[in-house]
Amino acid sequence: MEKKTKITGPIFIGRSWMEYIKMFDLDLKNLKNQKILDCAAGASSFTSYMHKQDFEVTAVDLIYDKSPEFLQLRCQKHLQALIDALEKMKQEFVWTFFHNLDELKKHRIKSCQDFYQDYKSGKGKRYLKGDLTNLPFEDNSFDLLLCAHLLFIYDHRLSEEFHHKAVEEMMRVTRKELRLYPLVKHKGLKSTMVEKVTNSLSDNYEFKLVKVDYQFRPGGNQMLVISKK
């Protein structure tokens, strides 16, 4: 009997560039000549796709010092663990972008493959190791920062202090704005960290909730946009 993978930290799976477009309400024609940073990017195919389209995108993740083969295997194991978990609670998710579990799996496998191929040539160039609370970039290095599926949904593991430090650090390296998605956790519960972060940092930044054309978790059709005043 095959031993199932137990995930103890943030899941490392392949979310697609198509999901990113919808999650972050991105209009590609407005992103030309913009420098973009994908934070805690995991095995997303966003950087791979954007690089092929001649956009200037950098991805940062805490484990981008690992080999392509290590990350490919981790993505495969984490994806199977996710599929096993979702099989038992399919009714708790919204099946509009993905119509069923098999479609989701195929989508994730393709994204992981695209990431793996691009990471092999881009490691150390457009894929850089970095901690969200201590990013390896100068102030105002990017026009737009994106951060998906880390802050808020892991508020049972990541402290309020971490959320504050991460947002402050991401805002340090952007010239314009930061977009965060999603704001809800399991069963559509909105993270209490959203209000805590916006209240504590309201003197420094402007916050806006924006509805997006993507939803997998119930209630997960909003992103938080943070911009400099």
Image (tube, rainbow, N blue to C red):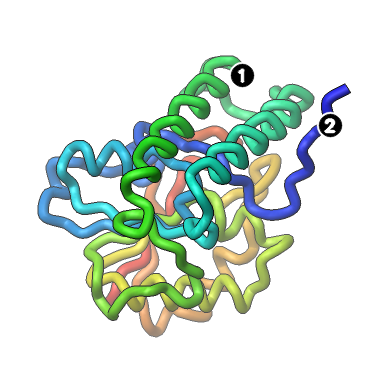
Horizontal and vertical percent position of residue 104? 54, 23
At 50% across and 75% down in the image, what residue appears?
133
Q: Earlier in the sequence, mark 2 or mark 1?
A: 2
Q: Residue under label 2, please give it.
A: 3
Counting labels gives 2
Q: Secondary structure at mark 2?
A: loop
- Residue type pointed to by label 2: Lys
- For residue 15, which numbered disc appears in the image? none
Q: Nearer the viewer, mark 2 or mark 1?
A: 2
At 70% across and 28% down in the image, what residue appears?
86
Q: Residue furthest bottom?
A: 203
- Residue type pointed to by label 1: Leu
Q: Quadrant of the C terminus?
A: bottom left
Q: Residues within 10 Å of mark 2 (few under 14, many from 20)?
A: few
Q: Residue under label 1, please give it.
A: 101
Q: Quadrant of the N terminus?
A: top right
At 51% across and 29% down in the image, what residue appears?
108
Q: Secondary structure at mark 1?
A: helix
Residue 109 in view: yes
Residue 181 in view: no
**Front in this rendered view, residue 32 or 4:** 4
Horizontal and vertical percent position of residue 177? 30, 65
Answer above or below: position of 150 versus 167.
above
At 54% across and 50% down in the image, what residue appears?
149
Residue 146 in which image quadrant: bottom left
**Front in this rendered view, residue 116 or 88:** 116
Mark-to-mark CA distance, 2 and 1: 21 Å
